[in-house]
Every structure is written in C-alpha cells, then in structure tokens.
Amino acid sequence: MLTALASKHPLRGGIDVGLATEIGPGEIYGTALERAYLLECRVAKYPRLVIGDELWKYLNAALTHFESQTTPVAKAITAIVRKTMQMIVTDADGRRVLDYLGLVMVENAGPDHGQLMIQPAYDFVLTEQKLMLSKGDPELIGRYVLLRRYFESRLGPWGIQVKTD
C-alpha cells in the first residue's frame, strides 16, 4: 500500500478468507475472491485495504486455539497472530483496515522508512488532493480528504510534520 502511494499509484483492496478453488492456472473462483472483490469495489472507496469479517473471525479463532497450547510452535503462532491483529484498526466508517502507518509498522520499520517511503506517499496524497480540488470532483475530493486524514493522524511517530495549506 505504502509503496504504491510513494510510487504515485493509489490502490485500494479487500482481504478476506473463504472457500475457493483454482479452476485454471492462476484462476481462482469462490467466496474468498468474491468477498475480497466486494470489499474493494463497494467498501474501500479510497486507497486503503479493508479487512473482511471472515478474516477477522479466522484470526480470532486461531488466537483462541493457539493460546491454549504450550508448545514453542503454538507460542510463536500466537505471537504472529497477535502482531497481525495489532496491524488492523477500525476506520472512521467502522470498517477494519490494515494500519500500514501504525505503531506496529513504526516499531518494525528501518530508520529511514519515514523519509524514504512515508514522506513521498504523503506528498503524493497532498498533491492529488489539490488536483482533485482544482478539478472540482466531489467524489475524489472526499476520498483524498479521508486518505489525508489517515496519514496525518499517524505522521508524528515517523517524525514527519503535518503540512497546513
């Protein structure tokens, strides 16, 4: 997500789990694909990755299952699932989204990540918002307002200053 924005290529998506089958080489069909597609086209609305309810249930079930075990593998899986769940937050519209600028990422990113990836992505968001304002496209203006709000709510830990227009 961040790489795409830093490369001036906004995208949105949905992530979910479910039954699926490969009906041909590289061609998947099933409820997993359908749910992910619907999350992308109907729910995401602006550049973000929406987490589906089935994925959230799956993570919770995995956590419950592995927390009750004491093997080293179970402890490792529990830690991974917890960290994964910490990277998911509830957005302003009540949907779960991948928090690619959140504290888990701050804790695990390299020292120059803010300047190398986040600053260019933030600059692109600001530029696109200005472009949409000049074009007068209310739908896209609204999308970039939401994306900018997300970025600006998380810039502090990265050492990046919020820009005021």
Image (cartoon, rainbow, N blue to C red):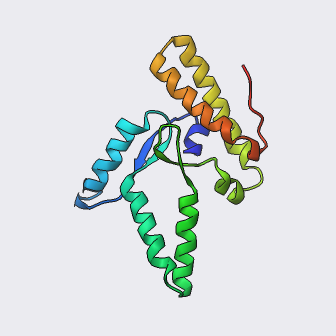
Q: Which residue ends up furthest to the left in the rendered image?
A: 23
Q: Residue at x 61, y 31 (%)?
A: 148
Nearest the camera: 1 or 31?
A: 31
Q: Residue at x 78, y 35 (%)?
A: 161
One can see residue 108 in this view: yes
Image quadrant of residue 7? top right
Q: Residue at x 52, y 67 (%)?
A: 81
Quadrant in which the N terminus appears: top right
Nearest the camera: 90 or 105?
A: 90
Asked if residue 83 is positioned above or below residue 27 in the image, the reply reads: below
Residue 58 place in picture, x, y as percent: 40, 64
Image quadrant of residue 154? top right
Asked if residue 153 is positioned above or below residue 58 in the image, the reply reads: above
Nearest the camera: 144 or 67?
A: 67
Quadrant in which the C terminus appears: top right
Residue 145 place in picture, x, y as percent: 57, 26
Residue 153 place in picture, x, y as percent: 67, 38
